[in-house]
Image (tube, rainbow, N blue to C red):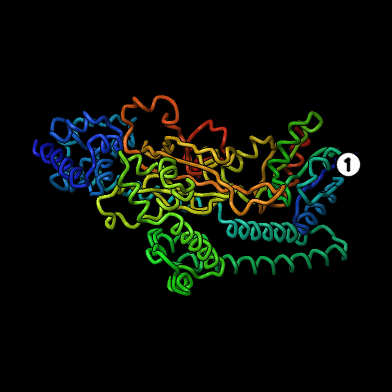
Amino acid sequence: MPQRQLTGGRIRERRIALGLRQADLAKQAGISASYLNLIEHNRRRIGGKLLLDLSASLGVEPSALTEGAEAALIATLREAASAVPHAKPETEGIEDLAARFPGWAGVLAERHRRVLALERTVEQLADRLTHDPYLAASMHEVLSSVTAIRSTAAILVDPREIEPEWRDRFHRNINEDAGRLARSAQALVAYLDGAGKADAALSSPQDEMERFLTRRGHHFAELEGEGALPDRMMAAIIDEDEALQSASARAQARLYLERYRADAERLPLVRLQQVRDEAQTTEEGLYPLHLSVRLGVDPATVMRRLASLPPAEELDGANRTPVGLVSCDASGTLLLRRPLEGFALPRFGAACPRWPLFAALSRPMTPIRQTLRQSGRHGRMFRAFAIAQPVGQPDYNADPLFEAHMMILPLSRDSAGQEMTSGPDLPREVGVSCRICPARDCAGRREPSILTDGF
Amino acid sequence: MAKHVLIIEDEPNIIEAISFILSRDGWQVDTHSNGHDAVAVVRARAPDLVILDVMLPGRSGYDILTDLRAQPETQDLPILMLTARGQARDRELAEKAGASRFMTKPFSNADVIEALNALVAE
């Protein structure tokens, strides 16, 4: 069929244009080189998740690899089918469905996309409601005041006699609790009112930092140059960004930028790109330990540099695989989050204790490599690299403080698993945070999940 | 002989109101307001029944309850849990930890007395 003929050729064309070897692209997509060869010569049908994964690896939209919107529609339908396997959808008839009932197929695909978007929203809101300390404390204050007032008022209206001393005392208590309730309610209303206003009112400093870094794509070209930086360069970056409103966020931004600059001086972009270009495989060009050895720079710095590369369109012919990064301090508090599509990170509070990020803290200076699959997230797989390194200067008789980094790469497809049946590449189920994790019987669970136990 | 109830709650006005209604109802009332040493206090005072708030300074009511259930002398002690959150998962947490009963704030005085009497009868 025409779609097949076009798709294979376009994949091949795009791969060659990027200077990628067939084996490298196949490895990124988690399939064998021979299978990719069949696809490229239009001898195997491609669609669904594999099409999405290959297009991600090639840095193009799925539709750019096919004859148009129809193939993207089919890919989405396949993804929708894989999300509800118990319904046993007739996947072999997806092309027929799209061809014969394009309107209905479009509705189904649109609904699937909408469900995914709403799931993400629910996760974020639930995460926020659960872990927002201000909201939790305010609600507790309101309910405690109401409880005290209700209980005390019931005593006062009881027809039984109360000694005057007790009656006066309860009147005072009610007055006190009513005042407390009024203040708590006003503060809560002001807080929730602020939630509707786009930015600062509800923001935590962490929110502000996240917006700042997202706007800049985690890359600061002005800090990449050689030689001394102009005076007030960092202050100007901070002053110019409206996202940074609070003093805390601005101080965090300053620390981030200072570390960014120190990283850039230790590992200039040009040098990093040079070594990556020399890498024999795409993986070599991304694996932090390999790069660390070649560059003579510690792995955590390499991870931070890989997570702050320029936008993909500015990378000449280089590997454009997106990189996610998360770091935490020794308490497990997340410090830095560079999201990677498909790998969810908690907005507030603690992450999944099964992440290698936390295992790294218990094995300082030992690099960890693991293949991860996030529970309930449609089976996408990722390769994670983690390491915990000391921060600050060593001192006599002082225990070092450790900071852990975990770099995440998309690992597009379970390649029927020949190389993933054992060892570090055996996929490991992890979650996002307990509250939104559907995994059952997890030894690390801290609280019930809203996905399995309901609201 | 009056039954002995220990109220572990950190809101002084709630403690005062509940203490009043229970005393008037014939209970011998004892109070404590932090979570740190709540388990030791329960063991030392040996009440017939405990009213235990979930959100306490120092330690969660769930943790205190779990500890009490792990000790032979308090494993069957009737315990009424009070919480500001009434969602299904909170009730489930309380049941898992071993609560005899679960009550959501704001409760009525009548509900508290009824719950305590029911626990004593059990």
Q: Residue at x 34, y 57 (%)?
A: A310
Q: Position of residue A139 (x, y in %)?
A: 61, 58
**Point 79% across, 47% down: residue:** B7
Number of numbered discs on residues: 1
Q: Is A233 left or right of A136, judged from the image as shown?
A: left
Q: Could you classify mark 1 by the number of other residues whose Cα lies within 10 Å: few (under 14), some (14-19), or many (20 or more)?
A: few
- Residue beneath the point at 47% across and 52% down: A337
Residue A199 lies in quadrant: bottom left
Q: Which of A40/A148 is in front?
A: A40
Whole-percent x, y for residue A194 in the image: 50, 68
Camera sees residue A105 = no
Q: Quadrant of residue B11?
A: bottom right
Q: Nearer the viewer, residue A211 or A85?
A: A211
Disc 1 marks which amino acid? Ala
- Side of B17 relative to A364 (left or right): right
* Residue at figure coordinates x 82%, y 43% from the top left: B5
Q: Position of residue B97 (x, y in %)?
A: 67, 36
| Relative height, residue A373 to residue A273 (above, below) | above
Confirm whether residue A340 shows in the render: yes
The residue lying toward the viewer, choosing from A155 and A405, is: A405
Q: Which residue is mark 1?
A: B2
Disc 1 on helix, strand or loop?
A: loop
**Please, which chain is the residue tagged with disc 1 on?**
B
| Looking at the image, residue A238 lies above or below residue A416 | below
